Each structure stands twice: as structure tokens, then as C-alpha cells.
Image: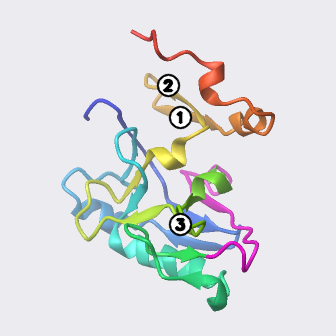
Amino acid sequence: HKQGEYRIQVTSIRINKHSAIPVSASISSNNPEGVIGGTLISTTIPYTTLHHTIYQALIQTVSAQIPKQAQVNPVAPFGLCYDPNRISLPLLVEFVLDKPDVAWTIDVENLWVVQPNGVHCLGFVNGGLKPKAVISIGTHQLEENVLAFDLVKSRLGFNNFLRFFEKKGINCSDLFDFTNAP
């Protein structure tokens, strides 16, 4: 794999603990680099990109949670946007990994992209029918998360505890100095 790319297995995307969007193994096997779950963690793309079928199911499921009067015309490259002045939207999105009780919860700040006009857009984009991976998790969804890769054991640890510091006015860049990294 290219530098800055890592693969994990996501079996489904769960919305508000109930609705699950399966990540089909048949879609994965049709991709040239496909693996079961076909999920890429990328530090080089800005927003999570989904295979068209999964993207459509996600947009349909999430839009059903948003009253029509709060939805607004989408702002490219996003497919679903809403006016936060018209509704408070509690939304929980989780990437379910190899077991149903193992899930990576996407923090609300990482779900939505705030546009200059204040509109909030779901920070996922349509990758079409032949994306590089069925799911490519982008940097917007990775922000303020700590990921620990155990390459020897092929395991990933993740935590969004940095949000605790952010609420106290401390950013990730205040905790770590990446300017002198080798």
C-alpha cells in the first residue's frame, strides 16, 4: 500500500444504534484491491469516500432522520445538507468492525462539514461504482482521534479522547509537536 494508507475490516455502518448498512463482501471482491470490508484509512483524502451503493444507502438512511423542512440543497461534493437553525440533529454513526460490539464511533464534529453560509453537510462523498476502496476514511473523520496501529498483530486501536481536551480549549497541535518529526 502507499504511504499514509492502512486497511481495516468494516462489516457495516450503523446509524443511531439501529439501522445498519452492510458493507457487502461482493462489492469488495469486485474491486481490484478489494479485501473483505475493503476499508482504507487514508491521510491523503479530505472526506470519507464510499462505494456508490453504500453511499446511497447512507444518504437515504440519514435523510430519513432529518425533517424535510430542515434539508437544504446539497453543497458539492456532498449529497446531504441541512440548516442547523431549523433542527438539532443528534446522529450517531459507527463503523462496525469484525464483531458487532466493536465499533468506531464517528464524533459529531467529524460527521458534519460546516459550510461558509452555516449549512451543515454530511462529510461523506460518493466514490462511484469503482472506488479505490469500498470505504476510504478521510482526514475530516480522523481529526482529533488517536489511532494506534499494531502492524505486527494487524490490530488497530482508536479513541477520540482528544475531544475532551478540545472542549477545554486545547487542540491536538497543542499536545503534540509534529514540526520536528523525522
Residue 101 painted magenta? yes
Q: Amino acid at mark 1?
A: Leu
The correct choice, above or below, for 18 with respect to 156 in the image is: below
Q: Amino acid at mark 3?
A: Leu
User: Left of 165 or right of it: where is 83?
Assistant: left
Q: Image quarter for residue 41?
A: top left
User: Left of 129 or right of it: where is 99?
Assistant: right
Which residues are the magenta region? Answer: 83-103
Q: Quadrant of the N terminus?
A: top left
The foreground one among 141 and 53 is 141
Mark sitting earlier along the chain (2/1) = 2
| Real-space Cα separation, disc 3 to disc 1, in angstroms | 25 Å
Q: Pinpoint residue 81: horizontal percent, then vertical percent.
A: 54, 74
Residue 173 painted magenta? no
| Real-space Cα separation, disc 2 to disc 3, in angstroms | 30 Å
- The residue beneath circle 1 is 156
Q: Image quarter for residue 3?
A: top left
Q: Pinpoint residue 157: horizontal percent, then vertical percent.
A: 59, 33
Q: Pinpoint residue 142: horizontal percent, then vertical percent.
A: 53, 43
Q: Is label 2 in a helix, a strand or a loop?
A: strand
- The residue beneath circle 2 is 150
In the image as oriented, which residue stretches furthest toward the bottom? 68
Q: Is label 3 in a helix, a strand or a loop?
A: strand
Q: Pinpoint residue 177: horizontal percent, then vertical percent.
A: 55, 15
Mark 3 against mark 1, which lies toward the viewer? 3
- The residue beneath circle 3 is 122
Tags 2 and 1 touching, CB below 8 Å: yes
Q: Residues within 10 Å of mark 3 (few under 14, many from 20)?
A: many
Q: Amino acid at mark 2?
A: Asp
